Amino acid sequence: MNAVQIDQLKQQFPLIETLQTYQETFWFTPHRYPLKEALEKVGLTAKDVSEAEARLARFAPYLAKVFPETQAQQGKIESDIVEIAHMQQALSSAKQVQLNGTFWLKKDSHLPISGSIKARGGIYEVLTHAEKLAMQAGLLKPEDDYSKLDQDSFRAFFSKYQIAVGSTGNLGLSIGIMSAKLGFRVTVHMSADARQWKKDKLRSLGVNVVEYASDYGVAVEEGRKAAEQDPHCFFIDDENSTTLFLGYAVAGIRLKQQFEQKQIKVDAEHPLFVYLPCGVGGGPGGVSFGLKLAFGEHVHCIFAEPTHSPCMLLGVHTGLHDQISVNDIGIDNVTAADGLAVGRASGFVGRAMQQLIDGYYTIHDERLYELIALLNQTENIQLEPSAIAGMMGPYYVQTSPDYLALHQFTAEQLQQANHVIWATGGGMVPPDEMQKYLSHFQYK
Ligand SMILES: *Cc1c(COP(=O)(O)O)cnc(C)c1O
């Protein structure tokens, strides 16, 4: 985009100026779209999501065998949800607003195998690919006990194939760990944001890690090009993959089950708000799709991005989606929230999900550090900076009269609301790194 186009865009969308100056801001979707039509626009269905869940169930015996940390849940990759009342109180005091409803933390930060939300989509896509190859070769049938995949003969079979992906770190970790375990050759193209320990960890598993001095977009592009050279190489396309998206979407069914067990109601009188950190959009987009299928119009999904990488807000707000990047408006895409350091949003997710996402806000890096320190202090839960971006969501909902009016929320409904802050990463961060994260913010 050239300077003239940007100026015109700014006239039309004054919010861009706020973004350009790295100020925290929020924007709620100004219309309420009928749910059924909005869901149809996604182009995927509840049936697709239940097939994804069934596929994960087929792999569960294998996962339980090769990843002992999944045994307690019989090979199911799922996280706990915990109430965080102390954090809610601490935030209320800090903001000098009594934040209503019940606060929950969905701990995808501590998902087994790779310790981030990417253990949903990333692992699911590798498993889907492996199943397809093995079935085409006549080595596997849906009714088999998939624990048989844990054999040298299967590893030898998969070693004929390669998997590649571009990542800021966590997707590479998920895909690298899962692919290497099955026996695939795997290459992870890492952007400059990726933490050293993630690269070290992958290399220790035999993963080929290619490092770039540039951001995520470049790592993905280079990965895509390298993969095209090799017909036996499968490129996992974080920007466009519906398979990844469906892996994430299974979270909707799972959260519904967890709420039923805890007897938590979600209906018109008990609205559910879910706050999701957003990078390229696949993770939060897929989870939101699953949530809308599971809870219908009673769930409200809000995305959170760093002030330095507000790609989804920019793309959806302007309607330009992946035709605009944060660099186009002079934003640097440099953030401590490495999992969210994405300058251009997924075109697929933005277009497919824009009528289903309720709002977006941005958050400063320093506030992320402050919030992880506060969560550690009040709840003894440790997250990486990206993972806590959703924590300010309830504040924006509660203090936005236009949004509350759009949905005609009553005081009583807000009292009875549940707020799920989706914590997306941190479980595998080495202790010394975590200590650095937690001590970054100094209380005065
Ligand atoms: C990848 C990631 C996200 C966001 O997922 P996207 O699919 O990139 O939007 C959020 N938090 C963490 C910790 C991540 O690694």
Image: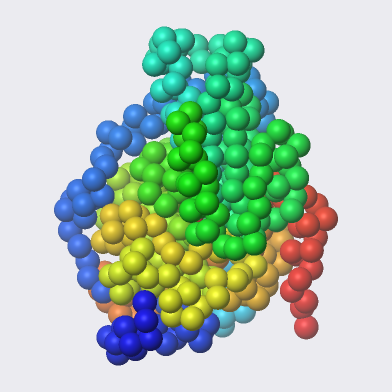
Q: Position of residue 174 (x, y in %)?
A: 59, 40
| Residue displayed at 36% across by 43% down | 242
Residue positioned 57% across, 38% down in the render? 175
Counting from the top left corner in percent of width and height, residue 14 is at 34, 87
Give me the residue at 67% from left, 65% from top.
372
**Residue 404 position (above or below residue 147):** below
Where does residue 110 sit, x and y in percent of width and height?
63, 45
Q: Is residue 69 visible?
A: yes
Looking at the image, which residue sits at the far front? 229
Name above or below for residue 412 compared with residue 96. above
Nearer-the-camera pick, 286 or 20: 20
> Measured along the vertical axis of the image, is residue 211 above or below residue 342?
above
Quadrant (top left/top right/bottom left/bottom right) for the N terminus: bottom left
Compared with 328, 115 (above or below) is above
Residue occupying the point 66% across, 44% down: 209
Q: Nearer the viewer, residue 224 or 190?
A: 224
Residue 7 location, x and y as percent? Answer: 34, 88
Quadrant for the C terminus, please.
bottom right
Horizontal side, residue 429 vs residue 187: left or right: right
Image-quadrant location for residue 136? top left
Left of 271 or right of it: where is 338?
right
